């Protein structure tokens, strides 16, 4: 009789990233837009077990994965930071390489080369996220147009009085 394999029937082959149910069920995650969740998975794709804090959203890497609009990536990154699902660990730039990020449900094992220190990093920060959404602007109207419209309304109301 052949030996049974010790590998569970549903074991994943190759590398994978485990996303805890506590994160998936958290208000910080469930309140995210679908695109922000997709960007979070792109960050998680880079994790190898010891590089939390060194995950990046480099334009060249994201373009290969179908993310073609830098403005969209920036907006979604800001959403993930606001919801405390990620934290920026290093400020990149022209000669400093890409910005680095960490997912907040995992510890950072090596703080060398980062702009934050261990006492400033709090695993589980996504549980403390303030989920007050900023006021959304009216679709198709920039802040500049809304300011002009408010000024005109004030002038009209002032003229009627």
Image (tube, grey):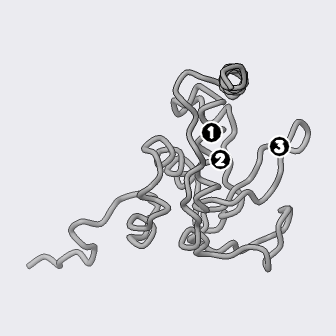
Position of residue 81 measured from the top left corner of the image (x, y, whole percent) = 64, 55
Residue 75 is labelled as 1
Position of residue 151 measured from the top left corner of the image (x, y, whole percent) = 73, 24
- Residue 73, relative to residue 19: is it above or below? above
Position of residue 19 measured from the top left corner of the image (x, y, whole percent) = 44, 65
Spatial separation of the CA atoms under disc 1 and disc 3: 20 Å
Circle 2 Cα neighbour tier, 10 Å, few/some/many (<14 / 14–19 / ≥20): some
Circle 2: element type: helix
- Residue 147, relative to residue 61: is it above or below? above
State the residue at coordinates (69%, 56%). 101
State the residue at coordinates (53%, 51%). 40
Circle 1: element type: helix
Q: In this image, 1 relative to 122: left or right? A: left
Q: In this image, 124 relative to 88: left or right? A: left
Quadrant of res 123: bottom right
* Quadrant in the picture for the N terminus: bottom left
Circle 3: element type: loop
What is the total number of numbered labels drawn onto the structure image? 3
Whichever of callouts 3 and 2 sits on the residue coming sooner in the sequence is 2
Q: Which residue is mark 3?
A: 97
**Mark closer to the observer (3, 2):** 2
Q: Are marks 2 and 1 in contact (CB under 8 Å)?
A: yes
Q: Which residue is mark 2?
A: 78
State the residue at coordinates (61%, 71%). 125
State the residue at coordinates (47%, 51%). 32
Residue lying furthest right: 95
**Mark closer to the observer (1, 3):** 1
* Quadrant in the picture for the C terminus: top right
Spatial separation of the CA atoms under disc 2 and disc 1: 5 Å
């Amino acid at each position: 009789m052949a030996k049974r394999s010790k590998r569970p029937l549903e074991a994943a082959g190759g590398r994978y990233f485990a996303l805890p149910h506590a994160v998936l069920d958290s208000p910080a995650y469930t309140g995210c837009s679908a695109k922000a969740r997709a960007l979070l998975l792109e960050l998680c794709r880079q994790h190898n077990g010891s590089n939390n804090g060194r995950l990046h959203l480099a334009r060249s890497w994201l373009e290969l994965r179908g993310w073609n609009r830098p403005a969209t990536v920036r907006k979604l990154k800001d959403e993930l930071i606001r919801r405390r699902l990620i934290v920026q660990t290093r400020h990149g730039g022209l000669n400093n390489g890409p910005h680095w990020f960490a997912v907040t449900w995992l510890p950072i094992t090596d703080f060398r080369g980062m702009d934050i220190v261990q006492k400033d990093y709090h695993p589980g920060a996504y549980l403390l996220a303030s989920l007050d959404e900023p006021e959304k602007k009216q679709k198709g109207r920039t802040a500049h147009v809304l300011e002009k419209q408010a000024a005109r309304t004030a002038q009209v109301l002032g003229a009627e009085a």
